[in-house]
Each structure stands twice: as structure tokens, then as C-alpha cells.
Image (cartoon, coloured by chain):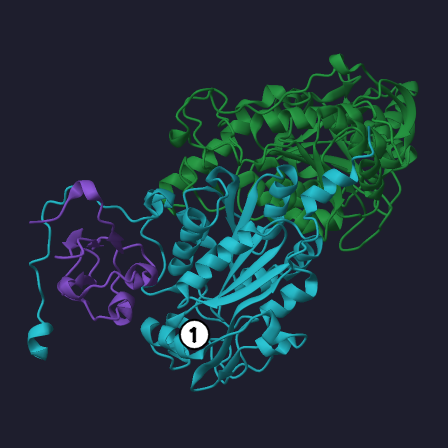
Chain colours: A green, B cyan, C purple
């Protein structure tokens, strides 16, 4: 059997689904390994990577024994110098939490695709939901800053996956893509540009010619962006990583000041580099008296409602944060001052927490659980109710 | 005369030695992390020493290619004391981490030094799967029959009848025979030694590391502070004397097909009365290890 | 650090009191009963292991191998250093 080697970037226009686009994005970014455990609605990702990654010369795409092993293998492969990807859905994401905590603490670049499904527990497999919004930030114990991106179209699934890898490599931190079951399986047109048009950023390594014995794996004191350069296993730097509070060279030390300094830097690293994250998407907000805040598939339903309401003469706009963690506060706050707010989401109310916090007022919540996207009619009803007041 | 010989002789002291003396393994120790956190007389230190001697004396693998991973627990700290590439993973997940590195960088030689609780309680699934895949790694399990770091609760290796904090009336359930698990799941090298048998242990570690494939070395260690104290086995010295008496050398031929011959026998009140030690399995016509198989498997893609 | 040299075989035994935790393993397992506890305590409060009768030492490496804390070891005698007169 001979299989022809496939190109890394499949330039062209396709009619494909979100799972396909996310995999293509990851492969265009140059992943070498993929470890995951099958879980619907992310199983398709696992299946497609297993076919595609070996054919482009990637090292390995494996189904491993469980979700916990997959995230830990990803951390290992990342410390060995590879770009790695893992994919999962709600229950699997819960299992990955401890490993993700380790990745935040040891500043390991990796990307985790989370195709959200109905919960809690086994919930609604194969159906869609947006209930992992809070878990992404607060799932693992302790304090850690999260970068999470939400695509709403198949095209964005492709673009944001590349973006996620670039952010992750640049900031040495895990990045999570919060897709929902609907976006991941929706068929749509997707355009893949030429390979040279795709910007791929790789992590920075230690300076050439430095004394290897003096290199410190977690020393960011001379870095403007507070991201320490990363050395890998087998390069002779004798690096050490630990989930314990550690000194700049990675030695565990349970010290109060050290812990404050370390966690502070990890937070600041994500805060001061916020210009790297995708900006929020706004639609007809300039003259809007009512603004809908929504992400993923609910944002598409909301867009439909906005268009219908505009036809009826109600001034409505849409604000769609693409980077949901950290919440795009600077872009959102001016809007929140002048308009009434409606939050549309496929959960009992999670996105509404940061929205109400930054708006400093009560907002209307249009919630939809049960596995199918919200009905634009219901959103329109909420808009009309608010407009009458 | 006897009295005379017991006297302290200070005449052999050299006040100003010609050179500065260093421990033979000093260059392989992370000096910032020493002294270790271990209790006086703990067997984990001896195991680290044996491992360092193995890599510096008995096996020819370049030190840049070796990396040490450990999980959580007393033994989990071991990777921090070794001046090689290392990682201190989360509880039970040392093997998946090492597998990830090994798959991403096949020339690397992972060595996992971890405890019985970490590898066989919370991490048993990963151990079985790594052995099944025959990933090229060496697992050194320091088995002290108890959870030491958390204060002496019973582990899956605590023998029947042994007392611990959570089994004050004696352990009820049966313990694991770790060699049995390793062999049953497809490990291609399996050995067991007590901390008393330092040279044999060190050589077995080197032999396991030279072996291509999954190698498992169990080290029976003394946790005199938690296990020894509650079971009236005395201090570190008494426990090592017990190992000296209880060890029984066995090899593949002695065991044959009856893997139960390798079971450790513990009698409440007496302690360990039989600890079979030796190299229990070494597959000479080795099946290919995992990262080589990956490379071979994708060869047809051209 | 206390360095002892064997009068004839010329090898060294070095005890590092800053690392020793006084577990007594080397003292117990020394086949010639050369080692013993110190009278004074070290900075951590342990009575540490000291070489008491270097003349009896047979360089069996038992102490170095038993020690969990890298605190006692043997220094090889190399030609350049010569012997102590």
C-alpha cells in the first residue's frame, strides 16, 4: 500500500463542516502530534486527524486510553518541542481539568478544542449547548488566566484554530476553542488561503550561544511580554518543570512571595498581550438602543432576530465577543452604557455573568437548553418586549 | 583489647585535603534541591543513588537523552533531585507525560521514578496501556507498601493484616503483586529488588534502560516512619535487616509459568518473611518498541 | 566535611555533616564496624555519622551505597595526590 503524501494546506474553497475546518486549521499551523479520546460531537475531529496528520508527515495521531492521559501526553509532547492538539467535549473537558491546570502552571503551549454538548454529566451527547463557558475559566482549582475563542462559522473554525496556536505559542499558555456542537457539524463554505498567506508563529527558544547550565526555564525578567523563552527536553538545558510553586529555574519552593510573584506574572502575561487576541465582532451597534450579546451558534440566531427587528424599525445591534476569556471589556463597556442589553445563550445563564458585571446593570436573558439552537422568534419577542418599555 | 579498638581514632583525619572531594554522583544532583525532603533512612534516597550510579557507570546512554519524570508522593520528588531534564507531573500521570515526550522525540529515554500509590493506584490504567504499547521507557517503582507523604494511609500494595492509619485493625483487601501486573500487561523487562541489594538494583536499572521497550523495576523500600512504626518493624536499620533476611533470589527459570511464586509474604507481627527478588522477565528477542513502530507504520506514505 | 585517609590503602572516606540525617544505616551495615555517631550535633540537630576507625576500613563501599542522603562517600586515591606521610 502506498499513500500519496498530502499537502499541509489544502488551498481552495470547500463545502465542509466545523470539525473539518478546525483540523485543517491545526494542520496548517503545523501540529506534529494529536492525542485524544473519542467523544461526540468531537469524534469526527479525532477520526479526521487520524487520517490527515500521518499523511502530511506529522508524527502521530492517537486515541489514547483516556482523556486524562491525552492532556498529559500533550503536555509531554509540547515540552519535547512539538505543537500539539487535543479535542474533546463537555465530560472529557471536565476530566482534562487537572491536566490543564498543570499546563497553565508550567506554561505549556497547547490547544484544546472543546466542542460543547448538553450537560450536566452525560447529558445530551451529540446535541449542542454552550454550557462550558464558566468551566473553561473556573474548572481547575486555583487561579489561572484563560484564553478562550469562540467560532460562529466554519470559516472561523479554520481561522481561529490557527489564531489559537499562534497565541498559545507566543504566550506559552494553553488556548481553548469553545465551539458548540452545532457549529462543529454545520456544513458551510470555507475558504483556505495559500500556505504563504497563513501567518504561523512559533514559540521563542533560548538565545543562541548562551551558557546552557545557566538557562532558566521560567525566567521572564528580561522579556517585555513577560513570556519566558522555552527550552525543550533533549537540548542539553537540563530543564525541570513542576506543578508546584517553583523558582525561575523550576525548582519547587513553597514560598509565599514566590507564589504571588509567579501567579501575578502568569496573569499579567495574558493581560498585557491582549492586543494579540481576536477583536469582538459588532454588527449595527452604532445607533443601537438594544444590543444583543451572544456567541457561537446563538449569535447566528441573534443576527437573524436583529435583521428582522431592524425591518420593523427597532434599533438593535449585535455584539459577539470572539475572545470570550478574557472578556473584551474595553470594547464592550462603551456599548453597555448607551444601550439595553440582551444575552442569548444555550445555557441557563453563564455568559450573562461577565456581561452584567461589566455593564453594571441588569440584562435580559434569552436562554435555550435542550440541544437545539435558540429560535430567532423568541429573541425577537424579547427585543420587542424591551423596546416597548 | 576490645575496649581499645572501640576508641575513636582521629589520627587519620586530613585537615587540608589536596583536592576537594565530591560525591561520585555530585554532578548529577541538583544541588539547590539537596538536602532531600525524605525522613532519615528512607529508601528513596538509596534508589536515586542507585539510579544515578546506573546511568553513570553501567549504561552508555548519553545523559542529554535521559529524562526523569515522577508523579506525586514522596518518590514524586525524586525527579527534582536529579540534574537531568525532568518533570514533576500531576498525581498518577507521570507515564502519559513520558509517553508524550517519547512519541514526540523518540531518541529520548524516559525514566519514571515514582511510588506505588502514584503508579498503581491512581495511575494503574496508564501503566497497563504503556506496557501494552511497549513504549521505550523504564519505570522504577519505589514500593513502600503505604502512602507515605499523606501520612500513612493504606495503599493497594499494603499486605493483608498490615496496620496503617486507615486500617487500624489490619488491612482486609488483598494487595497487588506489581510484577504480575507488569508481565500480564506486556512489559518486556521486569525485575524486583529491595533497597538492601544496591548493586543488583543499580545493575538491573541499567539493564532495563538498555532494554528496548517497556521495562519495569520494582524497588521494595522501607517506610519505617509510617509502615514500620505501625507494624512494629522498627526503624530504617531494622527494616533493612528484615529485607536482608527476607529476600529470596529468583530468576525466570525458577518462576516458570507460576507467577504467584513472586508473591511477597507478609506476616502480621513478623513483617516481610519472603520477598522474591531478581530479574523475573527479560524478553531477549524484543518486540519493536512503540516509537519505532510508529515510524515503520507510516513508511508507506510517500 | 571530614576527610579520613587510610594509612596503607590510601583511599579516603568523606563524611558530609551538612547532609547527614543520622539514620545510622552506614554505621549498622559497615562490616568492619568502623563508623559511629558523633558526640556533637550538626546544625539540624542530628548526631551524624563519623569515621571512628579508619584503619579497619576495607573500602567495601557499603556505607556509600546504603546512604540515602549522599552524605558519606569514598574518595579514590589517584597517583598524583600521593600518600600522606
| Residue A348 visible in the snapshot | yes
Q: What's the chain of the residue with tag 1?
A: B
Q: Is residue B151 left or right of residue B295?
A: left
Name the residue: 43% across, 42% down.
A246
| Image coordinates for residue C21, horizontal then vertical, percent | 26, 61
Q: Position of residue A140 (x, y in %)?
A: 60, 47
Q: Quadrant where the N terminus of chain B lies?
A: bottom left
Q: Would residue B64 be found to the left or right of residue C1 on screen?
A: right
Identify the residue at horizontal 47%, vertical 33% (top origin). Answer: A236
Residue A187, placed above or below residue B147: above
Q: Quadrant of the C terminus of chain B?
A: top right
Q: Viewer-proximal residue, B116 or C11?
A: C11
Q: Viewer-proximal residue, A135 or A192?
A: A192
Q: Is residue A385 visible?
A: no
Find disc 1 in the rendering and name its residue. B227
Picture coordinates of residue A135, whole percent (x, y): 67, 45
Side of B179 where B76 appears, left or right: left
Amino acid at each position: 500500500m502506498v499513500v500519496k503524501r498530502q499537502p499541509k494546506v489544502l488551498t481552495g474553497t470547500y463545502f465542509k463542516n466545523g470539525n473539518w475546518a478546525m483540523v485543517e486549521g491545526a494542520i496548517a499551523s503545523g501540529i506534529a502530534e494529536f492525542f485524544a479520546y473519542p467523544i461526540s460531537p468531537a469524534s469526527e475531529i479525532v477520526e479526521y486527524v487520524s487520517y490527515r496528520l500521518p499523511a502530511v508527515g506529522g508524527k502521530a495521531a492517537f486515541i489514547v486510553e483516556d482523556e486524562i492521559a491525552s492532556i498529559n501526553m500533550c503536555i509531554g509532547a509540547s515540552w519535547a518541542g512539538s505543537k500539539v492538539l487535543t479535542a474533546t467535549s463537555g465530560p472529557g473537558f471536565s476530566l482534562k481539568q487537572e491536566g490543564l491546570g498543570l499546563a497553565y502552571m508550567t506554561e505549556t503551549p497547547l490547544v484544546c478544542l472543546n466542542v460543547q454538548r448538553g450537560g450536566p454529566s452525560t447529558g445530551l451527547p451529540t446535541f449542542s449547548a454552550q454550557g462550558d463557558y464558566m468551566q473553561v475559566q473556573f474548572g481547575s482549582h486555583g487561579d489561572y488566566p484563560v484564553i478562550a475563542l469562540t467560532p460562529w462559522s466554519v470559516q472561523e473554525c479554520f481561522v481561529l484554530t490557527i489564531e489559537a496556536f499562534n497565541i498559545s505559542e507566543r504566550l506559552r499558555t494553553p488556548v481553548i476553542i469553545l465551539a458548540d456542537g452545532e457549529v462543529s457539524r454545520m456544513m458551510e463554505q470555507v475558504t483556505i488561503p495559500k500556505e504563504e498567506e497563513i501567518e504561523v508563529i512559533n514559540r521563542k527558544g533560548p538565545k543562541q550561544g548562551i551558557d546552557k547550565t545557566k538557562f532558566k526555564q521560567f525566567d521572564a525578567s528580561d522579556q517585555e511580554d513577560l513570556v519566558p523563552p522555552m527550552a525543550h527536553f533533549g537540548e542539553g538545558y537540563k530543564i525541570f518543570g513542576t506543578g508546584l510553586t517553583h523558582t525561575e529555574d523550576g525548582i519547587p519552593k513553597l514560598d509565599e512571595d514566590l507564589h504571588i510573584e509567579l501567579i501575578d506574572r502568569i496573569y499579567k502575561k495574558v493581560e498585557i498581550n491582549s492586543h494579540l487576541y481576536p477583536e469582538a465582532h459588532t454588527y449595527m451597534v452604532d445607533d443601537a438602543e438594544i444590543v444583543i450579546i451572544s456567541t457561537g451558534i446563538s449569535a447566528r440566531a441573534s443576527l437573524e432576530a436583529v435583521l428582522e427587528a431592524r425591518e420593523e424599525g427597532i434599533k438593535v445591534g449585535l455584539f459577539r465577543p470572539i475572545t470570550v476569556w478574557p472578556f473584551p471589556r474595553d470594547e464592550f463597556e462603551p456599548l453597555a452604557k448607551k444601550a439595553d442589553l440582551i444575552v442569548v445563550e444555550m445555557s441557563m445563564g453563564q455568559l450573562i455573568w461577565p456581561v452584567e458585571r461589566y455593564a453594571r446593570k441588569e440584562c435580559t436573558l434569552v436562554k435555550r437548553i435542550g440541544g437545539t439552537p435558540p429560535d430567532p422568534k423568541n429573541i425577537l419577542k424579547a427585543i420587542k418586549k424591551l423596546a416597548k418599555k | 583489647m576490645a575496649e581499645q579498638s572501640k576508641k575513636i581514632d582521629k589520627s587519620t583525619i586530613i585537615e587540608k585535603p589536596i583536592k576537594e572531594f565530591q560525591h561520585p554522583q555530585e554532578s548529577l544532583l541538583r544541588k539547590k534541591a539537596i538536602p532531600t525532603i525524605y525522613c532519615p533512612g528512607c529508601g528513596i534516597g538509596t534508589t536515586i543513588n542507585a539510579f544515578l550510579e546506573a546511568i553513570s557507570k553501567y549504561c552508555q546512554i548519553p545523559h542529554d537523552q535521559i529524562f526523569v519524570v515522577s508523579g506525586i508522593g514522596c518518590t514524586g520528588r525524586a525527579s527534582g533531585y536529579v540534574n537531568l531534564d525532568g518533570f514533576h507531573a500531576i498525581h498518577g500521570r507521570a507515564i502519559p507525560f513520558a509517553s508524550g515526550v517519547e512519541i514526540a522525540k523518540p531518541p529520548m529515554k524516559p525514566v519514571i521514578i515514582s511510588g506505588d500509590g502514584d503508579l498503581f493506584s491512581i495511575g494503574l490504567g496508564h501503566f497497563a496501556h504503556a506496557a501494552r504499547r511497549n513504549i521505550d521507557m523504564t519505570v522504577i517503582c519505589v514500593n513502600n507498601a503505604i502512602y507515605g507523604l499523606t501520612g500513612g494511609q493504606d495503599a493497594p500494595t499494603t499486605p493483608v493484616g498490615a496496620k496503617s492509619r486507615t486500617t487500624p485493625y489490619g488491612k482486609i483487601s488483598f494487595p497487588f503483586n506489581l510484577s504480575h501486573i507488569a508481565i500480564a500487561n506486556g512489559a518486556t523487562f521486569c525485575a524486583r529488588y529491595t533497597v538492601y541489594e544496591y548493586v543488583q538494583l543499580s545493575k538491573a536499572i541499567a539493564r532495563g534502560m538498555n532494554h528496548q521497550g517497556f521495562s519495569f523495576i520494582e524497588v521494595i523500600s522501607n517506610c519505617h516512619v509510617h509502615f514500620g512504626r505501625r507494624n512494629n518493624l522498627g526503624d530504617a536499620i531494622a527494616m533493612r535487616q528484615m529485607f536482608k533476611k527476607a529476600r529470596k533470589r529468583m530468576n525466570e527459570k525458577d518462576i516458570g509459568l507460576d507467577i504467584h511464586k513472586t508473591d511477597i509474604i507478609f506476616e502480621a507481627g513478623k513483617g516481610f518473611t519472603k520477598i522474591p527478588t531478581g530479574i523475573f522477565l527479560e524478553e531477549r528477542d524484543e518486540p519493536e518498541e512503540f516509537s519505532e513502530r510508529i515510524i515503520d507504520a507510516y513508511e508507506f506514505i510517500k | 566535611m571530614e576527610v579520613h585517609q587510610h594509612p596503607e590503602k590510601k583511599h579516603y572516606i568523606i563524611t558530609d555533616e551538612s547532609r547527614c540525617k543520622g539514620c545510622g544505616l552506614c554505621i549498622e551495615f559497615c562490616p568492619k564496624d568502623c563508623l559511629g555517631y558523633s558526640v556533637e550535633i550538626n546544625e539540624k540537630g542530628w548526631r551524624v555519622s563519623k569515621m571512628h576507625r579508619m584503619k579497619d576500613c576495607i573500602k567495601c563501599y557499603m556505607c556509600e551505597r546504603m546512604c540515602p542522603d549522599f552524605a558519606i562517600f569514598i574518595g579514590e586515591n589517584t597517583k598524583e595526590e600521593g600518600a600522606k606521610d
